[in-house]
Amino acid sequence: MDQGERSLILLAQHGDLGAFEQLVARHDRQVLKLAYDLLNNEEDAQDAYQEIFLQVHRKLRSFRFESGFSTWLYRVVVNYCINFRKRRSRNRFHFKDIATENGAVDPLEQIEDKSEDPEHAVINQELGQRISAAMDGLSEQQRAVFILRHFHGHKLHEIAAILKCAEGTVKNYLFRATRHMQEQLRAYHEDRL
């Protein structure tokens, strides 16, 4: 953490909204991208983004500089998104079943691919759906570790700090997640042959 960010945090902890806004500006893209990757839904990610920064604003006084600010912030994002997904799965209704009964079009069928090759577009859409389905088969911790490592490029020790667990635990989650994804996508590849 650089001195400028440390100063902004200290000012924001004492109620300086301008300093807090500067902190948000420094991290907003990464927070939105991580929320989207964890939730796999743009609207949910936008809602989560707003709620996350409200939580950060409320909890900022508890930040004690024991870790990097981005590590603490990513921990807030991951925990919020895990809880959001758990709440959503408890309250999930089958939109596709209800929509098709009412004559509505399945939203997944409305995804447009701008590529010129229609066969390529269909393959990409199908693969995207398979990847999403495979990701849904991961535990929340495995999903978070897989996304932080492969989509955001974090090192294992950074992920361990974000999730507040041992690096060995992160390795275990990553191993299991990678194996699961390979198995699921191998089945897709074999289906295509």
Image (tube, rainbow, N blue to C red):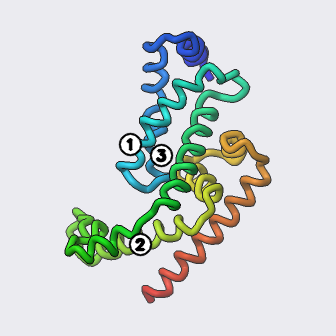
Q: Residues within 10 Å of mark 1 (few under 14, many from 20)?
A: some
Q: Between disc 1 and disc 3, whose residue precedes?
A: 3
User: Of 1 and 93, which appears nearest the observer?
Assistant: 93
Element on which disc 1 rests: helix
Give the x, y percent position of residue 70: 59, 32
Residue where numbered disc 2 is placed: 127
Q: Is residue 12 above or below residue 192?
A: above
Q: Residues within 10 Å of mark 2 (few under 14, many from 20)?
A: some
* Real-space CA distance between mark 3 and mark 2, rounded to the nearest whole angstrom: 22 Å
- Number of labelled discs? 3
**What residue is rendered at 36% in x and 50% in y?**
42
**Callout in the foreground (3, 2):** 3
Mark 1 and 3 residues: CB-CB less than 8 Å, in contact? Answer: no
Mark 3 and 2 residues: CB-CB less than 8 Å, in contact? Answer: no
User: Of 165 and 13, which appears nearest the observer?
Assistant: 13
Residue where numbered disc 3 is placed: 35
User: Of 88 and 130, which appears nearest the observer?
Assistant: 88
Residue where numbered disc 1 is placed: 46
What amino acid does circle 2 point to? Leu
Q: Between disc 2 and disc 1, whose residue precedes?
A: 1
* Apparent side of residue 175 relative to residue 15 in the rendered image (left or right): right
**What residue is rendered at 40% in x and 42% in y?**
47
Element on which disc 3 rests: helix
* Apparent side of residue 84 relative to residue 178 in the rendered image (left or right): left
**What residue is rendered at 39% in x and 54% in y?**
41
* Apparent side of residue 24 relative to residue 82 in the rendered image (left or right): left
